[in-house]
Image (cartoon, rainbow, N blue to C red):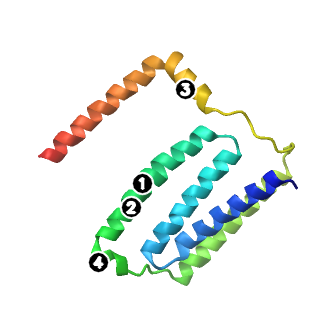
Amino acid sequence: MNLYDIIFYLFAAITLISAFLVVTNRNIVHSAFYLLFTFLGVASLYVMLGADFVAIVQLIVYVGGILILFLFGVMLTNKITNVEIKTGTINIFSSILGVGLFSGALLAAMLNSNWKIEESKIPEQTTGLIGHLLMNEYILIFELLGIILLIALIGAASIARR
C-alpha cells in the first residue's frame, strides 16, 4: 500500500463518516456543515481518480451554489435553527438494512467478476480535453445550449416579476 492509496482511503473515510453524520445528526445546521465535508470529500475523490473537471464542477455547483444557499436559508430563518430532526429506530434499522444489502450485492459482484486492479497511477487531466472538444467539435451545440439557458432565465425572471 503506497501513499496514494492511504490518502485515497483517508478521503473515502472522511466522506463516509461525514455522510453518516449528515443523516444521523439531529441539528439541521450541524447536518449542513457535515454535508459540506461530504461534498469536499467527494470532490477530493474525483481529484484522486483523475477526473479534475468533475471535481471542479462538484465544488462550483454543490459546494459553491447549493450548499451555500442551503446554509443561508437555514441560518437566516430564525425559527428553523432550533428545530430538532426526528430520527427513530425504524429509520436507522431500514438504513442499515439497505446499506448492508447494497454492500453485499456489490461485494458479490466484485468477487464474481474478472476485474483486475492495476497499480495506482494518476490519469491524465481531462479539463483541457473537454475544453478543446467544447470549443472545436461541439461549438454549435454549446452555443445553442447557452441560448436555451438564456431563454429559460428570461422566462423565469418574467414569471417571478409578476
Q: Secondary structure at mark 3?
A: helix
Q: Is residue 133 left or right of residue 148?
A: right
Q: Are marks 4 and 2 in contact (CB under 8 Å)?
A: no
Q: Which residue is mark 2?
A: 70
At 76% from the left edge and 40% from the top edge, which residue is drawn?
122
Task: Name the kind of residue labelled 4 in the image.
Answer: Lys
Q: Could you tell me which secondary element the residue under label 4 belongs to?
A: helix
Distance, label 1 to label 2, CA atoms, is: 6 Å
Q: Which mark is in front, 3 or 4?
A: 3
Tell me the distance, in whole angstroms, between the alpha carbons under discs 3 and 4. 45 Å
- Residue at the front extreme? 3
Quickly name the residue at label 4. Answer: 79
Q: Residue at x 29, y 68 (%)?
A: 76
The amino acid type, in three-letter code, at marker 3 is: Gly
Up the image or down, 155 lies above or below 9; here it is above
Q: Which residue is mark 3?
A: 131
**Image position, residue 103 (x, y; %):** 72, 62
Which is nearer the N-term, disc 2 or disc 3?
2
